[in-house]
Image: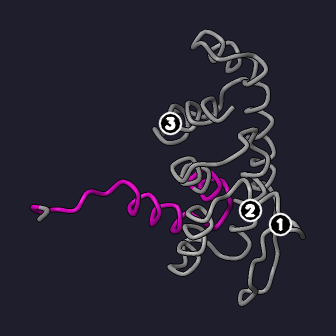
Amino acid sequence: MFEVLMYLFETYIHTDVDTMVDQDELAEELTEAGFNKEEILKALAWLERLAELQEADEPPAWARSAPDSFRIYTPEELYKLDTEGRGFLLFLEQIKVLNADTREIVIERVMELDSPVIELDDLKWVVLMVLFNVPGSESAYHQLEELLFEQPDGAVH
């Protein structure tokens, strides 16, 4: 499922291609690209749930928490998000790319992926997808994009 999400994000969202595509046409295109129909349906459902967050006027109740709150992970979350991933989320909060609400949305979306463990590179893409889709997170999205993709100028010693 994650490969389908990555393909969709890179093809339609990240490249500024017109995103108004019929879901049936999209499923057909993904099938022609070699993706499994079951994985396509899972990915489209995952994106649909993420899009619901974009349409909401405010974050869902489960995503709201006090800005100074401390996050304690459930055993399932600890298994799926390793120390490196949890540290990355904390780092993003500390530099104000994520806030408590967007952190919760990221964790919720990660938990819906069918992979038993999420690698750091995959987590980065999930964060980008969430920030792209949550209203008011445009600046945070661009900040993370620069952090992840910008190469430093000059020689590296």
Q: Nearer the viewer, residue 102 or 21?
A: 102
- Residue 154 lies in the magenta-colored region: yes
Q: Who's the residue at 22% across and 62% down the image?
A: 152
Q: Residues within 10 Å of mark 1 (few under 14, many from 20)?
A: few
Left or right position of 92 against 67: left
Callout 3: helix, strand or loop? helix
Q: Amino acid at mark 3?
A: Glu
Task: Please provide percent x and percent y for residue 52.
Answer: 81, 50
Q: Which mark is residue 78?
A: 2
Q: Which mark is residue 74?
A: 1
| Disc 1 + disc 2, Cβ < 8 Å | yes
Rendered position, 50 above or below 115:
below
Disc nearer the start of the sequence (3/2)? 3
Q: Residues within 10 Å of mark 3 (few under 14, many from 20)?
A: few
Q: CA distance from mark 1 to mark 2?
A: 6 Å
Q: Amino acid at mark 2?
A: Leu
Left or right position of 150 against 29: left
Q: Splitting the image into 4 quarters, where does residue 151 fall?
A: bottom left
Number of numbered markers: 3
Task: Please provide percent x and percent y for residue 122.
Answer: 57, 47
Q: Who's the residue at 71% across and 40% down the image?
A: 115
